Amino acid sequence: MPLIFLSRSPLSPTRLPAKDGRSDLRRAASQVFYPVLALPLLLFLGGCADAVTAPETNESAGLREVAPFPVGGAANVRFLNRDSTLTAFHGQHFSSITATNDMKMYAISPEPDTFVWEHADAMLAYADANDQRLFGHALIWHSGTPPWVSELAADPVALDSFMQHYITTYVGRYRGQVDGWDVVNEAMETVGGAYRETMWYNALGKDYLAKAFTYAHAADPDAVLFYNDFNIERDTAKLHGVLRMIEDLQAQGVPISGLGFQMHLRMDIPDETIAYCLKRGAETGLQIHLSEVDIIFNKHDDTQGGGVQLYDEVTEEMLAEQGEKYYRLAKMYREIVPPAQQYGITFWGFSDRYSWINGFFKLKDWPTILDRDLQPKPAYYGFRRALTE
Ligand code: 9MR
């Protein structure tokens, strides 16, 4: 399916329609505290896993039509232009899109005093043409920082001034059109609750987070502004570190409005731990985004090439279990996160053929909702069942 590009300039002042009419609700709810009891929920989920469910009456409808919250798929422009089967799937099933890499700092500002808008504009045009919400990933991230910006760290004043200029220009350009941003990504150490000593942290101290959110809010006061991290659904020390940081930001009046759980899950991460972490996250009152969902069978040590191949082949039974894991994840999100805080669930790649997992960790795995032939897996049906029950 060819991409259709609209003629509307990305500078148009019209905010993309609140596609489900919920944007205002989402923001209004961001300060509300919702206590949730995890135990009854887990008992309930345990019961549901075996429950006989009524057949769905609307099987041809896309996930986006049956979901009570936005459902997204991460993709790059090049990818969307290349694979028409996946483009068609993306348009049919997703109401939200995140650029996997095209909106990172290394893509937007690869050289000094340069902004390259071509791919971000194309993402916006694609989102517009498909009536999807565009989510911005990610403004400040140590791994997304191009070398020339890292060199600025020798002069903290210059680095701060660049950060302000970058965020103001970028968020300002897409004001009203990018619905929300990962303002800061992965500011905590891989394991445990300490700040990651990135060049941003080393030059500016932990205040770089407050500054980034403040600059982003000034550039688009209506955008939903997220802190996003990985393993915070399993490493409770890391989650608690993130919660302390959020409390600190909120106490200072910093305009943070969302918390992203990346949710790069593994089959053996206990549901009880995920439920606890979601509950604690929701208690912040922030919007909660499951921002990069996939579920692997094998293991890795969180480093590039660090895969541990436990399973060389996947069986029907394993795929069925993965379907139940997807089911329980979506169900937990629906039951634990109050509806007004459900910013949505986004898949980080949605086919086993193209998933980042295999190349990055040097693993053979089956993490997504479509198989290598781009056919829906039990994971797809499990996820869908949790939306429609
Ligand atoms: O999937 C992304 C991969 O293609 C890129 O090479 C990499 C570096 O930019 O980033 C990957 O996406 C990461 C995301 O931006 C942040 N959370 C972890 C994701 C997987 O590494």
Image (cartoon, rainbow, N blue to C red):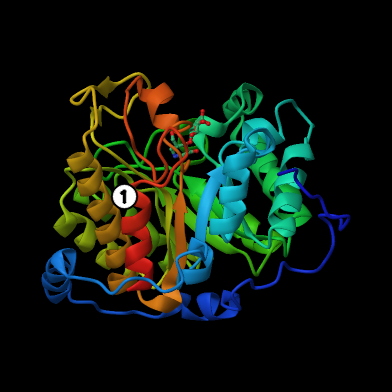
- Give the residue displayed 31% in from the left and 49% down from the top: 378
**Within the image, what quadrant is residue 113 found in?**
top right
The N terminus, quarter of image: top right
Q: Is residue 135 visible?
A: no
Q: In this view, does 378 lie to the left or right of 199?
A: left
Q: Residue at x 39, y 46 (%)?
A: 369
Which residue is depicted at the point 28% across and 71% down? 336
Where residue 384 sits, quadrant-wise, is: bottom left
Picture layout, residue 303 above or below residue 5: above
The image quarter in which residue 268 lies: top left
Instruction: Decide: few, some or many residues near mark 1? Use Cα within 10 Å; few <14, some 14-19, many ≥20.
Output: many
**Where in the figure is residue 300, as x and y percent of width and height?**
26, 27
Q: Disc 1 designates what residue?
A: 378
In the displayed structure, 24 sits above or below 168; it is below
| Disc 1 secondary structure class | helix
Residue 140 shows up from this direction = yes
Q: Where is residue 361 in the image (x, y as percent from the top left)?
A: 35, 23
**Where is residue 375 shown, x and y percent of the image?**
44, 42
Q: Residue sitting at 26 percent across and 27 percent down?
A: 301
Q: Nearer the viewer, residue 337 or 7?
A: 7
In what quadrant of the picture does the C terminus appear? bottom left
Instruction: Give amino acid for label 1.
Output: Pro
44 lies above or below 269:
below
